[in-house]
Image (spheres, rainbow, N blue to C red):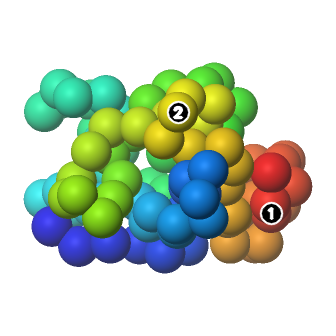
Amino acid sequence: MFEDDRLELISPTGVRMPAAVVRGEYRFGKGKHDGVKELATFAAGIIKSGKGGRFVTPQGRNTIKIGADAAVGYELDPAIAAAIGVPAKG
């Protein structure tokens, strides 16, 4: 596993939590079979569709989503944000 800081969720206390890449995939939810290879597809699912995804938190890798207690916002690479039609920060 490694982290991709081009998409980070932001906790209520300001902690940045980068997207986790597990075996070459960005994963939605807790399942092992709901993964995508492209960050843009993952970011669209997280930001536009409200899905939960795997992110690296201070406690380790967890499934979180925007609007839950764990994340109040996001920051996304501007080029990817433009490609999927969302602001780079939200």
Position of residue 47 relative to residue 22, above or below, is: above
Q: Secondary structure at mark 2?
A: loop
Classed neighbour count for the residue bearing mark 1: other residues with Cα under 10 Å, few (<14), some (14–19), many (≥20): some
Task: Using the image as rendered, state which of residue 47 and residue 56 is in the foreground.
Answer: 56
Q: Secondary structure at mark 1?
A: loop
Left or right relative to 81: residue 6 = left
Percent from the top left, x then y, of residue 37? 35, 53
Q: Which label belongs to residue 10?
A: none
What kind of residue is marked 1?
Answer: Ala
Percent from the top left, x then y, of residue 32? 13, 33
Classed neighbour count for the residue bearing mark 2: other residues with Cα under 10 Å, few (<14), some (14–19), many (≥20): few
Residue 80 seen from this side:
yes
What kind of residue is marked 2?
Answer: Asp
Which quadrant of the structure image shows residue 38?
bottom left
Left or right relative to 66: residue 27 = left
Percent from the top left, x then y, of residue 4? 41, 72
Q: Which label belongs to residue 69?
A: 2
Q: Which residue is mark 1?
A: 88
Q: At 80% across and 51% down in the image, what residue appears? A: 90
Percent from the top left, x then y, of residue 42? 49, 45
Mark earlier in primary sequence (2, 1)? 2
Q: At 23% across and 58% down in the image, what residue appears? A: 59
Say which of marks 2 and 1 sits in front.
2
